[in-house]
Image (cartoon, grey):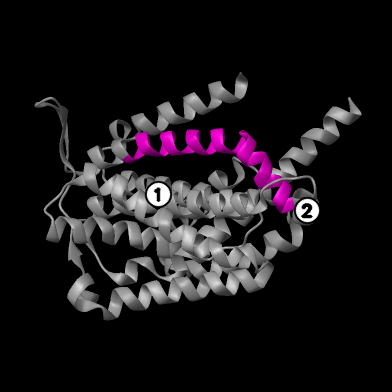
Amino acid sequence: MKKNLSLAIVVALLALAPALTSGSYIVAVLLLMLIYVILTTGLNLVTGFCGQFSFAQGAFFGIGAYTAGIMARDLHTGFWVHLPAGIILTGLCGLLLGIPALRLKGHFLAIVTIAFQTIVYLGLVQWTSFTGGQNGLAVPPVGDVGLFGHTFFTVSDLRSNYWMILVFTVILVFIAARLVNSRLGREWVAVRDDEVLASAIGLNTTRAKLTAFVASASFAGAAGVMMAHYMGNITPDDYTIWISCTAVAMMIVGGRGSFYGPILGAVLLTLLPEMLGDYARYRMLFFGIILVLAIALLPEGIAGRARKLREMKEAQA
């Protein structure tokens, strides 16, 4: 009950944030933070709960964004068509990437996902007739949101995009929570902890791993579509392996395999560059140092350490 109340308060404060600040800078940072919350939450499903290492979240992010850009250019469709299309397409790509997970584990699987990330980036750069190459693609704003010809509001500026992305973030986090607490989520954890034992007791480990990849990719695809419509113009350099590495760092620092840990990591590492001031251009260096320290000193992440401290206090009481 207390946890639900705390979450409601956090969401309410985030919803009020644009009204509490007159500038757009803070809102833009919070919007980016929400996008990374979606990316890390999705990544945590496949890596944290299912134990399949992936460095492809940036690729799925880009596939979702370019789905919106290409459909808008060639089919003249809008956001409400692009969003389900991006989710479905990235889910299918996640399914294809998940197939090697049936044979590979650990760093071998990580290498395959890095290769996939590189292939997607090079495809976006070199397939200029389809993706626009380094010139990028223009993506129209979301525009009017309504039902049966009645317009409720228009999503075209920073604040309206922020509120829309906040709503979708809450929905996706809720879906992730339901997945983790479902039978499928328990199968993911069983595969992560001991795949041989999970298979021996009759669990379908193939289905578990493939669904984890599909879910993770779909989350990134949804984030990509929303970010593309907010940015208005997308280029391949927006979807490099650094996006994947940043999501991995956020997940590990926050605590992979815990539900709220990666969300906390996304918040901290999104806000960190803004606190670095003139040193923000060295953010990847700082991320690397923080990641090494987290692995060495807090292998279970911030959320994991907090849980252990809480259990110790309860045991002493």
Residue at the image point whose x is 44% and y is 76% from the top: 118
For marks 1 and 2, the one nearer the N-term is 1
Is the residue marked by circle 2 packed among few (<14), some (14-19), or many (20+) residues within 10 Å?
A: few
Residue 269 image position (x, y, % from top left): 51, 55
Residue at the image point whose x is 68% and y is 40% from the top: 186
Quadrant location, the N terminus: top right
**Residues at circles 1 and 2 in contact by the CB criterion of under 8 Å:** no
Quadrant location, the C terminus: top right
Residue identified by numbered label 2: 194
Residue 294 image position (x, y, % from top left): 68, 59
Residue identified by numbered label 1: 35
Quadrant of residue 260 in the image? top right
Q: Which residues are magenta?
A: 165-194
* Label ID, residue 126: none
Quadrant of residue 52 in the image? bottom right
| Residue type at numbered disc 2 | Asp
Q: Is residue 99 left or right of residue 295?
A: left
Between 100 and 132, the one lying in front of the other is 100
In the displayed structure, 294 sits above or below 127; it is: above
Q: Secondary structure at mark 2?
A: loop
User: Does any portion of residue 276 appear in the rendered image?
Assistant: no
Asked whether 300 falls inside the magenta stretch, the response is no
| Residue type at numbered disc 1 | Ile
Furthest residue toward left:
149
Between 246 and 192, the one lying in front of the other is 192
Give the foreground label among 1 and 2: 2
Q: Is residue 229 left or right of residue 58?
A: left
User: Does any portion of residue 259 appear in the rendered image?
Assistant: yes
Furthest residue toward bottom:
126
Distance of label 1 from label 2 (alpha carbons): 32 Å
Asked whether 191 falls inside the magenta stretch, the response is yes
Furthest residue toward front:
202
